[in-house]
Image (cartoon, rainbow, N blue to C red):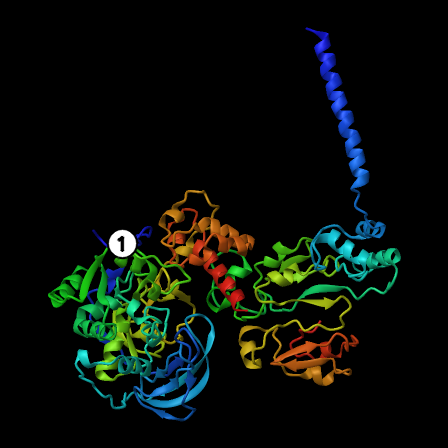
Amino acid sequence: MDLTAIIIAACIVGAVGLLAGVLLGVAGEKFKVAVDEKEIQVRECLPGNNCGACGFPGCDGLAAAIAKGTAPAGGCPVGGAPVAARIAEIVGGDTEASVRKVAHVRCAGDCNKAKDVYEYVGPKDCRIAANTPGGGPKGCAKGCLGFGSCVAACEFGAITIVDGIAHIDPALCRSCTKCTAVCPRGIIEMVPEDAGAIVNCNSNLFGKDIKEVCAAGCIGCGLCARNCPTGAITVEDHLAKVNFELCTGCGTCKEKCPVKIIE
Amino acid sequence: MKHTFKGGIHPYEGKNLTEDKDIKEFRPKGDMVYPVSQHIGAPAKPLVKKGDQVLVGQLIAEAGGFVSAGIHSSVSGTVKAIESRLTSAGTKVNSIVIENDGEFRSVEFEPDDTPLAELTRETVIEKIKAAGIVGMGGAGFPTHVKLSPKDLSAIDHIIVNASECEPYLTSDYRRLMEQPDEVIEGLRIVLAIFPGAKGIIAIEDNKPEAIRSLKEKLAGDERISVHSMKTKYPEGAERQLIYANTGRLINSGMLPADAGCIVHNVDTIHAIYDAVRLGKPLTSRVVTVTGDAIMEPANFLVPIGSSTQELIEAAGGFLNPPEKLISGGPMMGKAIYDTSIPITKGSSAVLALTKDEVAEYEEGPCIRCGKCIEVCPGRVMPEHLANLALQGDFEAFQKYNGMECCECGCCSYVCPAKRHLTQIIAGTRKEILAKRKK
């Protein structure tokens, strides 16, 4: 074999490579996009799971917004207070992070307390079951169906089905709100992590009617509202509701509730 | 060539249980329940209050808008309550409850013998509206709205849907066998207000007796023809029926009127006859009570508002404990879990089965055989739609024409893996429609 052919080929490839390298180097300097130092630092603080719960297109989007000052330092609901504190150090400003919110299932009607009125045959998916006659087999049309659409939606493994209803572990919840969006009955609500009292019922049925279908339903008696020292509880449309800003977590309502559904 | 469409299935018919049984008049004894929503559109507004005396044929709730229909009492008695009661859809609906005195005292009806040529459009529509007639095939679309399309001259076919493709159901067939003259007159009344239209009575060819008798009666009639349709489910689905009879295709965004057609159920046409000729409002319908769990399957003329429980008792009660109760036919009817529900304008049958074939099998994975696509009369891909639905990808679901599904159930019926395809697609359609409304 002719050695010169190989040497010529190697030289050409080498020369092309050198030329391309020089060109790239020049172009890299000339067309450089200025990146905000802060943005890179903020991005490093964020969790990086790109869940979109903040309302921006992924963590990069939020980092850019925080660096520009259009989003607050505590804008990442997943990271919570520690991340907010670190970001605040970088961008300066308000270090006080808001109280972390966690998802909570407002239903206590498990399979022992709320009976199914018929046998459901079909895909184990709440969204499909909710469109069958009566909105699913559960006697209560507002209660947790327990087929676990929220479990499938949760990326952090925070939700489990216990006795036929969903339970969310507040420690694992990353506040991404995917479960609240997927639940066909809208019974998952974002509540402050330190909420003093939560009413575990979503039904607006009249006391007698809810008693027929669930032993753990809010009957709208109003005992909690009357006994609350700070007036944090109101009963609207046969359902008690807690105003978390006024609630001091004294626990009076929990004692007074005849169906024991305030936790 | 037979009138037919692409796709469809041949389920077990089960019509032999009741097809030769004459329509018996059923006289309820217990309380009557009239849900204010027995139709598509605005709920009716109750006109009576607790303690009022009512007579058969008395208007007890007026139409709540243009797309709505009034409701008439089918018994005489006292209004007991206006409260929410369970209906066949499984939800509680505000209902007028009347304590039946068992005497069936009636208001006076005014018969009308005006010759067909002199009937005006306004009087016919007015009488139909006053009689509270809605589509009695199940959907319950108010008939006066259906008969008032935007462009009257565009309507060239009035189709009487007598195909009754749902297994077990024989109510329309018995109506045709026992009262063909009334049905024909009813159709002539509708044709009288659509001068440019032709009448078609579409019957599946598994009812040769009905086809023969109607053809004899209509011999020499140039405006009305009797079409013998190939026996196949869902031959009686509106879109398939229109295609089979006229070759015109419509989609979910169109109305039959866009294809120049108006389709009426046999019982609806009969109710139009009653309303225009006898002045009688819609207070009863033919209901088939059947299934292998029923002692004596039969066809009944049932006052609307009767309790399903009483009706089952009139058919001799249960022969065997039923495993599944259905309001309507087995393919598109609604499974019910309580026999206290009332018979409404759209209840064509009460079906009690000793075997729940759906619950009997475990759902398996799709084996990609494509049978569901083959049988789908809506010409969509059920397996693909079901997968998209389960993934929650509603955008792709609509892109692949998921909204064209008519929920006939053919895909679920034919699926060898026993996947609940119709249920998944129907549930997702409902969710998307609900989201669109928001």
Q: Residue A213's x, y, as percent? A: 54, 73
Q: Residue B152's x, y, as percent? A: 30, 71
Marks counted in the figure total 1
Position of residue A20 in the picture relative to residue A95 (left or right): left
Residue at the location (78% across, 53% down)?
Answer: A46
Image quarter where the N terminus of chain A lies is: top right
Res A46 visible: yes
Q: Decide which of B321, A120 is in the foreground and name it.
A: A120
Q: Which image quadrant for residue B231?
A: bottom left
Circle 1 residue? B4
Position of residue B344 in the picture relative to residue A204 (left or right): left
Name which residue type carries label 1. Thr
Q: How many other residues sit within 10 Å of disc 1, few (<14), some (14-19) or many (≥20)?
A: many
Looking at this view, name the residue that lies furthest to the top. A1
- Using the image, name the chain to which the residue with label 1 belongs: B
Res B359 visible: no
Residue at the location (18% across, 83% down)?
Answer: B114
Q: Which image quadrant for residue A217?
A: bottom right
Q: Residue B381's x, y, as percent? A: 43, 49
Q: Decide which of B88, A101 is in the foreground and name it.
A: A101
Classify mark 1: helix, strand or loop: loop
Q: Decide which of B284, B266 is in the foreground and name it.
A: B266
Q: Decide which of B279, A6 is in the foreground and name it.
A: A6
Q: Residue A248's x, y, as percent? A: 79, 76
Image quarter where the C terminus of chain A lies is: bottom right
